[in-house]
Image: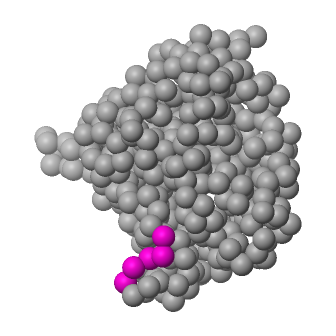
Amino acid sequence: MPQKQLALAMFLFPGYHLGAWRLPDALPEFDVDIDQYVRAAQLAEGAKLDALFFEDQAAVRRSQDIMNGDHYGVASPRSIHLDPSMLLPALAMATSKLGLAATATTSYNEPYNIARRFATLDFISKGRAGWNLVTSFNEDEAQNFGHDSHLAHADRYERAAEFVEVVTGLWESWDDGAVVRDKENGVYFDVDKMHFLAHKGKHFEVRGPLTHGRSPQVRPVIFQAGASEPGRALAARTADVVFTLQSDPAKAKDFRDDIRARAQAFGRNPDHVKILVGMTPIVADTDDEAQRKAAEMMGLIPDDLALSDLRALAGGVDFTKTDIHAPIADLPPSNAGQSHRQAIIDVSQSRGLSALETAKYFAEGSYKKMVGSPSTIAGTMQEWLEMGATDGFLAVPTHFPTGVEDFTLKLVPELQRRGLFRTEYEGDHLRDHLGLEKY
């Protein structure tokens, strides 16, 4: 039986590690530098990764609830980044096989715009587009779109469920071969193969169709992350790829088993829903060198920045008003992202970390840290794959260029040597790379 291979995507979010951007070899100006993004994309494609993935938040994240005049209390490097929907077409022209995925929120967009935007990217990239469906956990976004506060969690997911129904319907509003461009008979498209969606629901009324025929994939790949009950239900019903915050392989297996069972209950083939565990690789030639590198980056994170960043992830809990040297027993319910809230509790309690130590953990990024030589990290990734804890990983390098280079030029070749990852692309579309259902 052939060895199972990993799905592997790379998540680029400048400033994700709150200390690594200060390293001498880091280029923090990468956050708005198209030439460096192109280089990162080409490194990813050279490593034969499935996709390059971009997160997005349409707001500068407040590190404190109270602003001093027009200035925020603590400035986070995670606040500075480009609109990925504008960035990906440029990267599509600099690559030929790499999947290109970006976040767009269902809370502060309209379905027609999103359907058209990602179908257009699918045309530009010749079938490599992916949409990361989020409902937004950053409450600061609301105030950039005419709202005093974030939509309630349940309402966000109810809207999202209808939103994705409209988007997928619009993607399929043209039959195959509808646009004929028949010069001889003067027929540009076959009106019988064009369909009005005519959707009327609680949140949206959308006529359709889109302003073009079927895109190469028909449905760009839908990515989603969600740990709450409505988040899991939405992922199982609609997502092709599900990201998850997991640090324990047994719990990761439980999560994967749950999503697959839910997908099957919705009448889907569970093998067409890929679960990717988020991981932050800190790679060096030896384990000791990698640990020293991790400690150096950790030492560059100010305590106040780490605590204020954790406050945002925890739904506004001000840890400076608690004993920051005691573990986090629990967190009050909030209207922010539920997956981060639960991950904070799990990390603190399972590892016996204080609030400050937990803040430092998440200041390195929310995902599981894998620190070591290429052989050590690849071994861990192989264990997770073989025990059914994941279908692959979403790797979040700490900084550019070195963090990206260490992942693509050191760790990926070790995975390839073990037969855990491809050495050449076998298809042209992102759905081909991931082994997903074709439309």
Residue 22 visible in the shown view: yes
Majority secondary structure in the magenta region? loop
* Residue 345 showing in the rendered view: no
Is 184 displayed left or right of 250 in the figure?
Answer: left
Q: Nearer the viewer, residue 286 or 126?
A: 286
Total marks in image: 0
Residue 289: x and y, percent?
A: 59, 25
Classify residue 70 by image quadrant: bottom left
Q: Where residue 218 appears, x then y in whole percent? A: 45, 45
- Residue closer to the observer: 37 or 73: 73
Kindly identify the residue that appears in the image at 65 percent across and 54 percent down. 360
Q: Nearer the viewer, residue 395 or 260?
A: 395
List x then y, in percent, for residue 386: 78, 24
Horizontally, is 152 left or right of 348 in the view? Answer: left
In the image: residue 416, left or right of residue 74:
right
Scheme of image coloration: one colour
Residue 24 position in % (x across, y down): 39, 38
Is residue 137 rendered magenta in the image? no
Which residues lie in the magenta part? 70-74
Q: Is residue 341 above or below residue 402?
A: below
Q: Quadrant of the N terminus?
A: top right
- At a point 35% along the width and 51% down the height, the residue shown is 31
- Which residue occupies 46% across, 21% down? 409
Q: Name the residue: 38% across, 65% down.
A: 113
